[in-house]
Amino acid sequence: MSPERVLICQNRTCKKQGADKVLAAFQASPVPGVTVVASSCLRHCGSGPMVLVEPGDVWYCRVRPDEVTAVVERHLKNGVPVKGMLFHPPHP
């Protein structure tokens, strides 16, 4: 199943950590069939900027704009999550 939606937290803490630039980097690298969404809080403020890829609930933490290309190329286009950037939420 290929990703259909990428949520990038734009809440206060993530924005202070550069989430607006991460959102812009995803928007500048569109992938057919994938929607990029500026989301409200994703509930992991200390690990931001947070990115959630759905379906599959694949989480990325502390994403920098220069890392977006890796997520786009490996995960969104080829279905292989970027292991070094993954975040495993402590609770569902």
Image: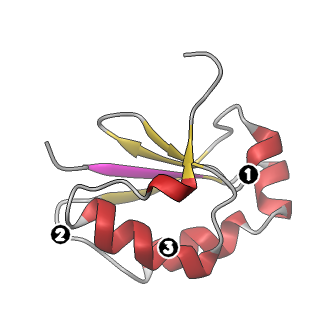
* Marked residue nearer the N-terminal end (1 or 3): 1
Q: Is 79 placed left or right of 47 in the picture?
A: left
Residue at the spot of label 2: 32
Name the main secondary structure of what is drawn in magenta: strand
Which amino acid, mark 1? Gly
Nearest-to-viewer mark from 1 and 2:
1
| Magenta-drawn segment | 4-8
Vertical order, 44 against 77 (above or below): above
* Cα distance between the residues tagged 1 and 3: 14 Å
Give how far across and how far down residue 74 sits, in percent: 31, 67
Q: Is 48 placed left or right of 6 in the picture?
A: right
Q: Is 77 placed left or right of 14 in the picture?
A: left
Image quarter (top left, top right, bottom left or bottom right) of the N terminus: top left
Give how far across and how far down residue 32 sits, in percent: 17, 69
Identity of the residue drawn at 58% across and 82% down: 66
Label 3: few (<14), some or many (≥20) within 10 Å?
A: some
Mark carried by residue 74: none
Which amino acid, mark 2? Pro
Identity of the residue drawn at 61% across and 77% down: 65
Residue at the spot of label 1: 48
Residue at the spot of label 3: 68
Query: SS class of the residue under badge 1?
Result: loop
Vertical order, 60 against 18 (above or below): above
Nearest-to-viewer mark from 2 and 3:
3
Identity of the residue drawn at 32% across and 34% down: 56
Could you say which is closer to the camera, residue 11 or residue 88? 88
Query: SS class of the residue under badge 2?
Result: loop
